[in-house]
Image (cartoon, helix red, strand yellow):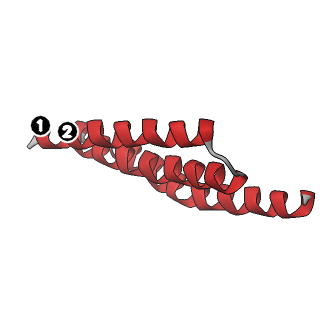
Amino acid sequence: MSDYLNLAVTVLTLTLLGGLWRLWLGPSKLNRILSLQLFGTIGVAILALLAVVYQQSALFNVALVLALLAPTATVILVKMGETKS
């Protein structure tokens, strides 16, 4: 079962690299903000999987905190973009 979890972490990491590519080349600010939201979502998933693999509840707690902070950061970035326009 650990092999499947390692494969899932690898696939999520590759998806994270795809998001980094979109962040770098995003034609608009919206694409960049959405790729940052993708980082938060994938970060939560990777931390939750690693918490299961290594049986560390602290990693799961960090994943939960990130799950709360990532949407908040996205809302703040969107609001900052609206005020500058």
Packing grade of label 1 (10 A; few <14, some 14-19, many >=20) is few
**Given the image, on which type of amino acid does mark 2 rest?**
Leu
At mark 2, the secondary structure is helix
The quarter of the image holding the C terminus is bottom right
**Residue 30, located in which quarter of the rendered image?**
bottom right
Of 84 and 59, nearer the camera is 84
Of marks 2 and 1, the one in the foreground: 2
- Residue at 23%, 44% (x, y): give it: 8
Total labels: the figure holds 2
Residue 65 percent location from the top left of the image? 53, 53
**In percent of the image, x 8 and y 44: which residue is there?**
1
Q: Quadrant of residue 83?
A: bottom right
Q: Secondary structure at mark 1?
A: helix
Q: Is residue 79 left or right of residue 12?
A: right
Labels 2 and 1 touching (C-beta < 8 A): yes
- Judging by the rendered image, the residue that carries numbered circle 2 is 7
Q: Is residue 80 left or right of residue 47?
A: right
Residue 2 position (above or below residue 32): above
Q: Looking at this view, is 48 or 23 the one in front? A: 23
Q: What amino acid is found at the position of numbered circle 1 in the picture? A: Asp
Against 26, residue 64 (above or below) is below
The residue where tag 1 is placed is: 3
**Residue 60, position as x, y percentages in the image:** 38, 49
- Taking the spot 44% from the left edge, 35% from the top edge, the residue there is 17
Q: Residue at x 70, y 51 (%)?
A: 28
Is 7 positioned to the left or the right of 41 in the image? left
How many residues crowd mark 2 within 10 Å: few (<14), some (14–19), many (20+)? Answer: few
- The image shows residue 70 at horizontal and vertical percentages of 58, 55
Circle number at residue 60: none
